[in-house]
Image (cartoon, rainbow, N blue to C red):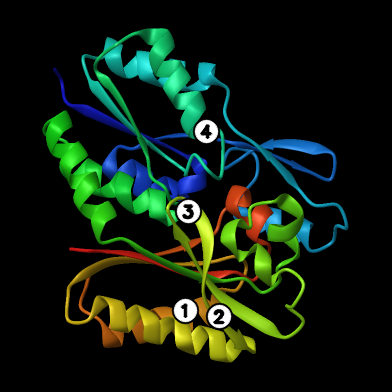
Amino acid sequence: MAGIQIVTDSASDLTPKIAAQYGIRIVPLSVTLGGEHYTDGVDLTAEEFYQTLRTMDVLPRTSQPAPGSFVDVYREALDAGKQVLSIHISSKLSGTYQAACLAAEMLGSGDIKIIDSESASMGVGLLAIAAARKSASLTEAQEAVARAKETMGVLFTPDTFEYMVKNGRIGKAASLAGSLLQIKPILTIAGGTVDVVEKLRGRKRALRRMLEIFRERVGDNKVHVAVLHADAEEEARGMLEEIQQAVDCAEVYFAYVGPVIGSHAGPGVLGLVWHLA
């Protein structure tokens, strides 16, 4: 074989620059915003998405890629003599993983392996990067993903709970829905769904505590970490600076929460995703 093609979806929130650096193919999801249909990352950037979102009363909707979109990418890789490792947003949050599985079945090739990240955003992206670093063989890439998943952590705090409640992506955090006037929860993704870590009053307290939890969980270990924000760049950059001072970072990524995840989490989200180096 001529190597491994790593594939993911646009809910990974990988930037085009990072995807190109590691040779990762991104299959985009779709977003419907204000009656207009967009292809995530193709004709709708994160900046454009949040500018529009803040002016609208109607919530956006997202759609997974059609299996045919994956078939095209997989076939191209197979025709080039490559094996495929395809890593996707949690199957409990989106139908994207199922679409990828269906595409693999349609092609009937044993050289395509699909992984459910059981995560979202850069929880998917960091796994794709881990696989791309170890892409000498399919087995090696799969083992790299498994190791990263074992030590992966996700923490995030939404500025508003409205989007998660109305879009139904709330998981075990549903119990918070009626009591969030001043509560700013710290959330995680566990077992592929959203869960509550802690509940605090006020955004500053939530952000401070999120950093404390991150440092507690990381300890003295070296980490690969991503700092993400949904149109809250100033706060996110402050968090990034604190992380770089407090933790031994192998790599640090700073990125927007893209339109797909932002449609369900809303503007103002701040998040951390990491795994041990």
Q: Considering only order in the chain, which callout, 1 or 4, is on the residue closer to the N terminus?
A: 4
Q: Is residue 65 left or right of residue 35?
A: left
Q: Secondary structure at mark 1?
A: helix
Name the residue that disc number 4 marks.
96
* Residue in front for this viewpoint, 171 or 216: 171
Would residue 10 appear left or right of 107 to someone viewing this image? right
Q: Residue at x 47, y 53 (%)?
A: 121
Where does label 2 land, which residue? Answer: 234
Amino acid type at circle 2 is: Glu
Q: Are marks 1 and 2 in contact (CB under 8 Å)?
A: yes
Q: Give whichever of 89, 231 is nearer the camera.
A: 89
Contact between labelled residues 1 and 4, with CB atoms less than 8 Å apart? no
Tell which circle, 3 or 2, labels the residue nearer the N-terminal end: 3
Q: Check disc 3 and report the residue beneath it.
A: 121
Percent position of residue 34, x then y: 84, 45
Q: Is residue 18 left or right of residue 48?
A: left
Q: Which callout, 1 or 3, points at the residue further toward the start of the chain?
A: 3
Q: Is residue 241 visible?
A: no
Q: Secondary structure at mark 4?
A: helix
Q: Residues within 10 Å of mark 3 (few under 14, many from 20)?
A: many
User: Mark 3 or 2, which is nearer the eye?
Assistant: 3
Residue type pointed to by label 1? Arg
Q: Is residue 53 above or below residue 225?
A: above
Which class describes the residues within 10 Å of circle 1: few (<14), some (14-19), or many (20+)?
A: some
- Marks 2, 4: nearer the viewer: 4
Q: Nearer the viewer, mark 4 or mark 1?
A: 4
Task: Give the distance between the C-alpha atoms of the residues marked 1 and 2, in whole angstroms.
Answer: 5 Å
Q: Which mark is residue 58?
A: none
Contact check, label 2 and label 4, Cβ < 8 Å: no
Structural distance between the alpha carbons of marks 4 and 1: 31 Å
Q: Residues within 10 Å of mark 4 (few under 14, many from 20)?
A: many
